Amino acid sequence: MANHPGFGVLLTRLLNHRRMDVTWLASASGTSEIELRSVVSGVPPLASQLDDLAPALGFHADDLYVIADVPAPEARIPWDPAAGSGIASLVKITMVLPSDHRARVHRLVDQLPHELRDPPSLPPRTYDQHQSGFGAMLANLLCGNRNLHSLTAAAKTLALLTDGRVYLAASTISGIGRGRVPLTPDLVTGFATALGISAGDLAAIIGVELPESSRPDDPLAAEMAGLLSNCRRLTAAQAERVCNEAKSMLVAVPNDATGEDWNRVYHQPGRWWGAPRR
């Protein structure tokens, strides 16, 4: 597995893929062209520079920190390792809801305050990008930067957002993070879907060639990737609260309902709960 070549190389790959240049990016981001050329030449970027580059490139700044392998400001690190299972369940439930109910879930997440938290007794799992390369970058983006932390929660969420096309064991996610699993076009595309990042952009950064034919964009997957990103700041208690609210929006599935017409989400004795298929 190739080691992390430095942010300057990755930024150059992205600009080449988009057929843009440093002069354009300097103007769009308000960054000095001299400073930007030094970054492209190999000088590690400052956090403030990444903050300026992110909106111009259409990335979340928090994702650029990971891509550049630059530590994020402490206040922006999603460090509640217990939140992952609740967030994965929230995505699973919200995906089946009608659009107006999904909008309510988005509003609930947006309205929650950013709570101050004590650092965990054990730091969240991170993978060494300089040792394990792009697999570590992808695992850090999905597990840590989306507040999932749990490898099982990450695997479930990846399967949900790719409609089962990328169905991995938790151990495989770990293998990706350790640089032991080759990054195929299907894997890169699947991670891109879950992260809400253009597959072409992510493949260009990593250096993986995608096939010319690709699946059409899935608006629901893109929406859920946005929800997942917004959940990165939630505590476990907040994630559980929103998940319970979303769960209350489900309805009892009729006994004679078919799988073609209904999504079944969870079962209580004698009754399935879910929502009609769109």
Image (cartoon, grey):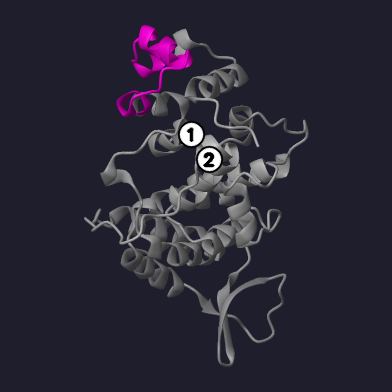
How far is disc 2 from disc 1 in space, using C-alphas? 6 Å
- Number of other residues with Cα within 10 Å of mark 2, as a class: few under 14, some 14 to 19, many 20 or more: many
Where residue 180 appears, as percent x and y from the top left, is: 66, 47
Circle 2 is placed at which residue position?
137
Q: Residue at x 66, y 58 (%)?
A: 168
Tell whether position 30 is magenta. Answer: yes
As helix, strand or loop, the secondary structure at mark 2 comes to helix
* Mark nearer the N terminus (2 vs 1): 1
Instruction: Tell which of 91 and 11 is nearer to you.
Output: 11
Instruction: Tell which of 57 and 5 is nearer to you.
Output: 5
Tell me: residue 270, above or below residue 149.
below
Is residue 41 found left or right of 111 in the rendered image?
Answer: right
Tell me: residue 75, above or below residue 36.
below
Q: Main secondary structure of the magenta part?
A: helix
Tell me: residue 121, above or below residue 230.
below
Instruction: Tell which of 30 and 11 is nearer to you.
Output: 11
Where residue 240 appears, as percent x and y from the top left, is: 37, 69
Q: What amino acid type should be assigned to the residue bearing mark 2?
A: Met
Where residue 208 appears, as percent x and y from the top left, is: 69, 32
Where residue 106 appears, as percent x and y from the top left, is: 40, 55
Q: Which labelled disc corresponds to residue 67?
A: 1
The range drawn in magenta is 25-50
Q: Residue at x 49, y 52 (%)?
A: 143
The quarter in which the N terminus is drawn is top right
Q: Which labelled disc corresponds to residue 146?
A: none
